[in-house]
Image (cartoon, rainbow, N blue to C red):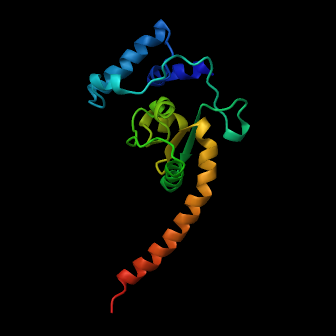
Amino acid sequence: MRENHFNCAVGAYTHNIALSSERESEAEQTLKMMFDLDYIKPEDVALIPRLPEAPAAIVYAPLGEAAVPPDVVLFACKPSAAMLLNEAANRAGIEGRKPILGRPTCMALPASLQHGAILSLGCMGNRVYMGLGEEEMYFVLRGKDVAAIVDSLPIVAKANAALRDYAEVRCSELTTTE
């Protein structure tokens, strides 16, 4: 499946996958277009997280159906779910207090491997190619952190339900006029 990343020159870059000579010109064209649009600056490219070496294979599968233990887990979810996952990661002591990432989406995978839990707003290419809805974003974490998130999530969800109830009552009290 590594070859699928050839379809996006930026994804090939973040995953450290060498493009064929025919595709290298596409990477240059894509970057030139992004520079010309003032979407990114040439100096931004060096700041994009990247895998240290090309992966032997890339396997995408639903978490419960993965044939191998995942290095990275990617959740496409609504912001409210990303909030709960992020809070569970914080409760579990999982590193990841990085700013929310934007473009390119594919940098969230190497960033997660380097730093832990990552929130990503996505980018236009990913939203088009993957069909990510306007109301969705990504929460990305290392595969080794899944168990800690699973353990923390019920506590965080219960606390948030209680806090929601409290805030709704409090909000009602604050908006009531005498």
Residue in view at x 60 percent, y 31 percent: 71
Residue in view at x 45 percent, y 30 percent: 107
Q: Is residue 100 above or below residue 84?
A: above
Instruction: Report the number of numbered marks.
Output: 0
Q: Is residue 71 above or below residue 131?
A: above
Q: Is residue 154 left or right of residue 160?
A: right
Q: Quadrant for residue 100, please give it.
A: top left
Residue at the limit of the structure toward the front, as seen here: 93
Q: Nearer the viewer, residue 57 or 118?
A: 118
Residue in view at x 64 percent, y 27 percent: 59
Q: Quadrant of the C terminus?
A: bottom left
Residue 65 appears in the figure: yes
Q: Is residue 139 left or right of residue 98?
A: right
Q: Nearer the viewer, residue 28 or 96?
A: 96
Residue at the limit of the structure toward the bottom, as seen here: 178
Q: Quadrant of the N terminus?
A: top right
Task: Measuring from the top left, give residue 165's x and y in whole percent.
Answer: 51, 74
Task: Measuring from the top left, give residue 37's x and y in whole percent.
Answer: 28, 29
Residue 131 appears in the figure: no
Q: Nearer the viewer, residue 88 or 54?
A: 88
Task: Measuring from the top left, give residue 53's x and y in whole percent.
Answer: 51, 16
Residue in view at x 48 percent, y 39 percent: 127
Task: Measuring from the top left, give residue 57's x and y in whole percent.
Answer: 63, 20
